Amino acid sequence: MAIPASVLGIGRAGAGTNNIPVTQMSARGVVVFNAPGANANAVKELVIAGMLIGARNLVPALRFVDSLTGDDESLQSQAEAGKKNFVGHELPGRTLGVIGLGAIGSLVADAAIRLGMNVIGFDPEITVEAAWRLPSQVKKAASIEDLVRQADFISLHVPLLPATRDLINAERIKLMKQGTVLLNFARDGIVNEAAVLDGLNESRLHAYVCDFPSDLLKQHPRFVALPHLGASTEEAEENCAMMVAEQLADFLDHGNILNSVNFPNLGMPRESKWRLAIANANVPNMLGQISTALAGAGLNIHNMLNKSKGDLAYTLVDVDSPVPDAVLQGLSGIEGVLRVRYLPAE
């Protein structure tokens, strides 16, 4: 859809922003927010359910029982005779490999440890905040290849990006232990479905449990797909909505940014009634030009904060007196400035 020029920010009540034209919005100085962690507990619980589904062969067992016919005595006799085909194993002592150790991955790791599992993790982009959340018992894998060699269960918690598409491919599946359970409650494109099908047929993969239907895999008895239930709880939906609403309100009223996927996180307490919020390209001398334009208009800078993220930067400026329209136009005309917002306190 065409996004009007009046749009200042976009909030995604969830983690993924693949349904938002982020690059296009960045060029217009539109900040795109998401709600990382708001649905983390809901996804964590579904991952634990997925591990139990895979370990105990619950879906094939359910299908078996649904196929039985006869009276109660006959059903019980058939069930007893057939249950040997669905013998599973318990979780304690098994190893879970977690790829992606953000809000969800760290909760999954913690829950698995509490169930008596060994946990190894891999995340080359882990933040300091995420590292603090991570249980100390999680062992660090040297690479994805190192992780998949060791794990009995593998759970994926990374966004779908060009670098993560087909993250689990034929080469990595061949490195897995015989009988590995693969869990994907992140995005379907992270896993190469043709490679997974081969892995299931060769029993390299004992089961593939995910949150995404697949026409290629749907007939395989050890493929389990849920209808994207990861964040589908009343609690998660409310948490996401509240987080996004609060972030957008703070951005619209005060220019502060928290949990943006395209601009840097930046917050500055108000120390003046008159504030400017400037989205700009991350280029040399931008702060110098902004300061010069304000000084030339006789405006004293009370406080100023600037941060960058890749090719983009964001600046908050509190000044000691009202900002004339001519100054706003001058700032907007600086090469590399994407958007200027004037936010006087009411």
Image (spheres, helix red, strand yellow):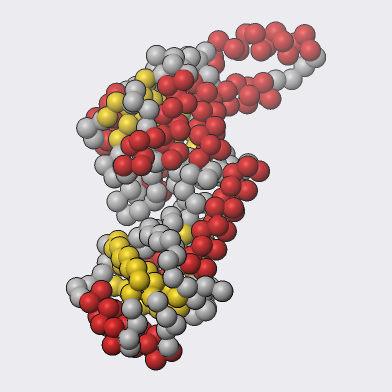
- Residue 18 appears in the figure: no
Residue depicted at x 57% and y 23%? 58
Q: Quadrant of residue 318?
A: bottom left
Q: Is residue 54 above or below residue 248?
A: above
Q: Quadrant of residue 132?
A: top left
Nearest the eye: 276 or 28: 276
Q: Is residue 83 above or below residue 273?
A: above
Q: Quadrant of residue 282?
A: bottom left
- Position of the C terminus by quadrant: bottom right
- Residue 92 appears in the figure: yes
Nearest the eye: 59 or 91: 91
Image location of residue 85, percent across then percent down: 54, 14
Residue extending farthest to the bottom is: 326
Q: Is residue 17 left or right of residue 296?
A: right
Image location of residue 284, percent across then percent down: 19, 73
Image location of residue 163, percent across then percent down: 29, 51
Residue depicted at x 37% and y 20%? 118
Nearest the eye: 5 or 199: 5
Image location of residue 327, percent across then percent down: 37, 87
Residue extending farthest to the left is: 284
Nearest the eye: 280 or 273: 273
